[in-house]
Image (tube, rainbow, N blue to C red):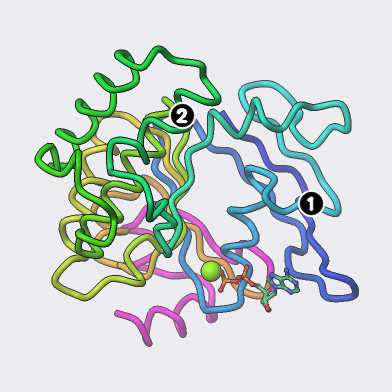
Amino acid sequence: MITVKNLQKHFGKLEILKGIDLEIKKGEVVVVIGPSGSGKSTFLRCLNLLEEPTGGEITFEGQSITAKKHDINQTREKMGMVFQQFNLFPHMSVLQNITLAPLKVKKQQAAEAEKIAVDLLRTVGLEDKRDAYPAQLSGGQKQRIAIARALAMQPHVMLFDEPTSALDPEMVGEVLEVMKKLAEQGMTMVIVTHEMGFAREVGDRILFMDGGYIVEQGTPAEVFGNPQHARTQDFLSKVL
Ligand code: ADP
Ligand code: MG
């Protein structure tokens, strides 16, 4: 579904991504771990061109999205993204938050957009919150709405950047549950997280990033159970 070849990202003289190679298959759940500052967010943001790569190539569903002539808006619609900060529109109800992009971008009919939104609210366990405003929701509820909002565009892949890092501990589980359900339904997902238990349970593949490289990758059993690289061992010894 996604192929990344020699992906590089520089900010001025600062080299952040130094040549990332990766293939992500349809239905695969790839979990990215690694220390702060290793380039995880930059990598995720390059995948949907929120950051413009300075080198290398990304293809998505057979099309080069880094080619000059590529229409990025078309690709972004197919890539849902969930951030650490939920970024809900505060002046809009839950239902309006979820239906905004489908109405404006996908030109869906109001009744259809609403039906999809209500189905998604059920998926994330918040069907009773359709008319609530973000300020009336807990952090965990806001993040579940942010996930529903991303899903409303019917994306082919979901990118998550530390979706539970801003949450109080008691709310982390409810968000991870929703993500686990999505994974079980076959959604292709790339997830940056520090939740190692979740990574081990839900990830098909773990990537360990450090210093702008993928230092090591493998199944959860391989990476957590028998890390090969000293940097992976050192990182895991601090977080497990
Ligand atoms: P991670 O998500 O693994 O913590 P990031 O991808 O956010 O790492 O950041 C990697 C490095 O890139 C950091 O040193 C950060 O300061 C730098 N960086 C990120 N975005 C920018 C930017 N827009 N301009 C300059 N430096 C940046
Ligand atoms: Mg980050």
Helix, strand or loop at disc 1? loop
Q: Position of residue 161 (x, y in %)?
A: 47, 59
Question: Is 199 placed above or below 112 here?
Answer: below
The residue beneath circle 2 is 155
Magenta range: 212-240
Work out which quarter of the rendered image holds the N terminus and state it. top right
- Give ligand 1's quarter of the image: bottom right
Q: Label 1 neighbourhood size at 10 Å, few (<14), some (14-19), many (20+)? A: many
Q: Quadrant of residue 188?
A: top left
Does residue 119 sit above or below 123 in this rendering?
A: above
Residue at figure coordinates x 90%, y 75% from the top left: 13
Q: CA distance from mark 2 to mark 1?
A: 22 Å
Residue of label 1:
53
Using the image, determine if residue 87 lies above or below residue 101. Answer: below
Relative to 105, is 52 above or below? below
- Quick one: 155 or 134, which is closer to the camera? 134
Amino acid type of the residue that numbered disc 2 sits on in the rendered structure: Pro
- From the viewer's side, name the closer residue of 81 and 13: 81
Q: Is residue 51 magenta?
A: no
